[in-house]
Amino acid sequence: MSERLKAVFKSEPTGVTRLVSYIMAGDPSVEASLRRLKGLADHGVDVLELGVPFSDPMADGVVIQAAAERALNAQMTVKKTLELVREFRRTHDTPLLLMSYLNPLLRYGWDQLAEDAADAGVDGFILPDLPWREGQGLRMRTKKRVGNKLDFIPMIAQTSREQDVQAVSQVTEGFAYVISRNGITGGEVELPASVNKFIESLGNSLQIPRCVGFGIQKPEQVRALAKVCDGVVVGSALVKAFAKLDQKGLEEQDLIEQEKEVFSWLASLKN
């Protein structure tokens, strides 16, 4: 297991729970992505998710779809994403996971990707289109290449079959990404009342921490979830906040100042 990721869940959270946050690599530029990764880390985000842009992100709503399109238009690639991580690692130790669909990673070449990702300072992968049981071969192949340097984060939904939950119950490294509601990322829909009970039930099955994502954007949601999970994931709401700033056409210094307000808003969610 990644030592950086392990340290996050061994220590007590600052605030009501741990915070996992997502941005898209290259949206709107490499320079902005690097600055925002550093800003998020500096403002207490516990784990970073860095999206790899892909043209058909099936699990994502319109906000992250648009972010992927902007990044692709800016010529962002897997190679440039790894270079971005390497630059981030020069100054920061916050755990960082690549969230990606399989297509661009396989096109890069999986064995080379595993080696390059571990070398750049990536801590693991979240792969929405690779079911956990079907991914066993890829995980074993990765371990042969880089040992335990890269974690694979399983995703679990209320619609997951019993055998899928059983498979994840054998996992002892990383954390489980629990999907708070059925459907795609983002949106203003309230979390279903059943989600807390579902998360609690997973606590009886899983050996790893549970972090909950999809649609989380309000302090009251975070406080409610903090009672039953080990962390929350904020993605679309953060991507949307940065996109609004980018659309203003601000001078760089003014943009940087307003980014600080976004960082402060995000940090406030777990206070």
Image: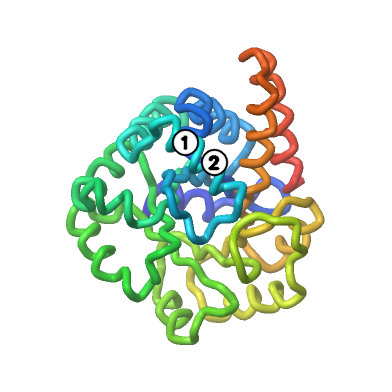
Query: In the displayed structure, does residue 161 sit left or right of residue 257?
Result: left
Mark 1 in CB contact with mark 2 (< 8 angstroms): yes
Secondary element type, mark 1: helix
Q: Residues within 10 Å of mark 1 (few under 14, many from 20)?
A: many
Residue 71 marker = 1
Q: Nearer the viewer, residue 67 or 168?
A: 67
Secondary element type, mark 2: helix
Name the amino acid type tagged 1: Ala
Q: Residues within 10 Å of mark 2 (few under 14, many from 20)?
A: many
Q: Name the residue rendered at 70%, 33% in the picture.
A: 262
Q: Name the residue rendered at 30%, 43% in the picture.
A: 117
Name the amino acid type tagged 2: Ala
Q: Is residue 18 above or below residue 31?
A: below
Query: In the displayed structure, does residue 218 sit left or right of residue 247?
Result: right
Residue 146 lies, in percent from the top left, at 22, 51
Dot 2 corresponds to which residue?
Answer: 67
Residue 136 lies, in percent from the top left, at 29, 70
Q: Quadrant of the N terminus?
A: bottom left
Q: In which quarter of the view is residue 268 placed? A: top right
Q: Nearer the viewer, residue 1 or 247?
A: 247
Q: How many marks?
A: 2
Q: Residue furthest bottom?
A: 162
Q: Is residue 212 visible?
A: yes
Q: Name the residue rendered at 56%, 30% in the picture.
A: 36
Q: Name the residue rendered at 61%, 59% in the picture.
A: 213
How far apart are the alpha carbons under marks 1 and 2? 6 Å
Q: Is residue 19 visible?
A: no
Q: Nearer the viewer, residue 3 or 140?
A: 140
Residue 45 lies, in percent from the top left, at 60, 41
Q: Is residue 95 above or below residue 210?
A: above
Q: Quadrant of the C terminus?
A: top right
Residue 120 lies, in percent from the top left, at 31, 36
